[in-house]
Image (tube, rainbow, N blue to C red):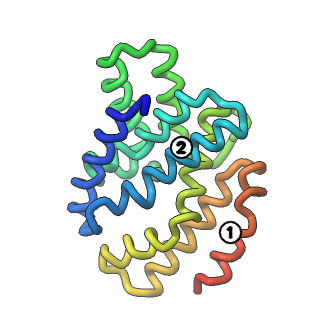
Amino acid sequence: MKYEKYYKLVEEQSKIYDKTQNCAIGQTWQFHLLPVIQSACKLADIYNANRDVVELGAIFHDYANLVDYANSEQHHILGAELAEKVLKQDGFEQDFIDRVKLCILNHRASVLREKFSIEEICVADADAISHLDNVVELICWRAYLGEDIMTCNNFVKKKISKSYAKMSKETQELMKDKYESIMKVLL
Ligand SMILES: [Fe+2]
Ligand SMILES: [Fe+2]
């Protein structure tokens, strides 16, 4: 695998994160990070985006959260900086690094999508898809944090609605059935 080193780096860091979140070790990697990377690569093929930029953007998109969840509010900005450090050390060109950084910086954004590159859209859409594909993990995560059923339900409902709203129109079409089914099940 081309970027195996970074897969390993992020997988290891996500195990440390799971401990701090009181989650099952490996949960975040298996049910969020890896699915985001896989969906992002699939979207890169569908939308003819640069696969390397997309794959690296997806690998590092939540990295700052994994390093310290206190970074949560700023994790898109800090994550872009951390990825730059790693990729610079490994000799990647600055232009390429900047494109990866934009994917990380804008993976949370939900407005002005037309200003974004297709690579940024792939990573942001894949992040949103992962919340729909792994809704059970989202529920378990909130339960592990000690939330009661309605607080957990409301958090997940809001997260799923926001995730669907931030997807590009094309990806919304792909995910429409799943979105509507999840919303029917939630309270
Ligand atoms: Fe994120
Ligand atoms: Fe994410």
Number of the label disc, if any, that sits on residue 6: none
The spot of residue 5 in percent (x, y) is: 32, 33
How many residues crowd around disc 1 within 10 Å: few (fewer than 14), some, or many (20 or more)? Answer: some
Q: Secondary structure at mark 1?
A: helix
106 up-or-down from 141: above or below: above
CB at mark 2 closer than 8 A to ligand 1?
yes
Q: Mark 2 Cα within 10 Å, few/some/many (few <14, many 20+)?
A: many
Image location (x, y in percent) of residue 142: 38, 73
The residue type indicated by label 1 comes to Lys
Query: Quick check: can you spot residue 55?
Result: yes
**Residue wearing tag 2:** 107
Mark 2 or 1: the one toward you: 1
**Count of marks placed on residues:** 2
Name the spot of residue 112 as percent of width and height, x first: 69, 40
Report the residue at 37% width, 30% height from top: 83
Does dot 2 land on a helix, a strand or a loop?
loop
User: Do tag 2 and tag 1 residues touch (Cβ < 8 Å)?
Assistant: no
Quadrant housing the N terminus: top left
Q: Amino acid at mark 2?
A: His
Q: Looking at mark 1, is its residue's CB closer than 8 Å to ligand 2?
A: no
Could you tell me which residue is drawn at 51 percent across and 50 percent down?
36
Indicate the quadrant containing the C terminus: top left, top right, bottom left or bottom right: bottom right
> Which residue is at a point 36% across and 80% down the rendered structure image?
147
Is residue 70 in view from this perspective? no
* In-image side of 75 versus 154 (left or right): left
Give the mark, 2 or 1, whose residue is nearer the N terminus: 2
Q: Which residue is mark 1?
A: 178
As drawn, is 33 to the left or to the right of 20?
right
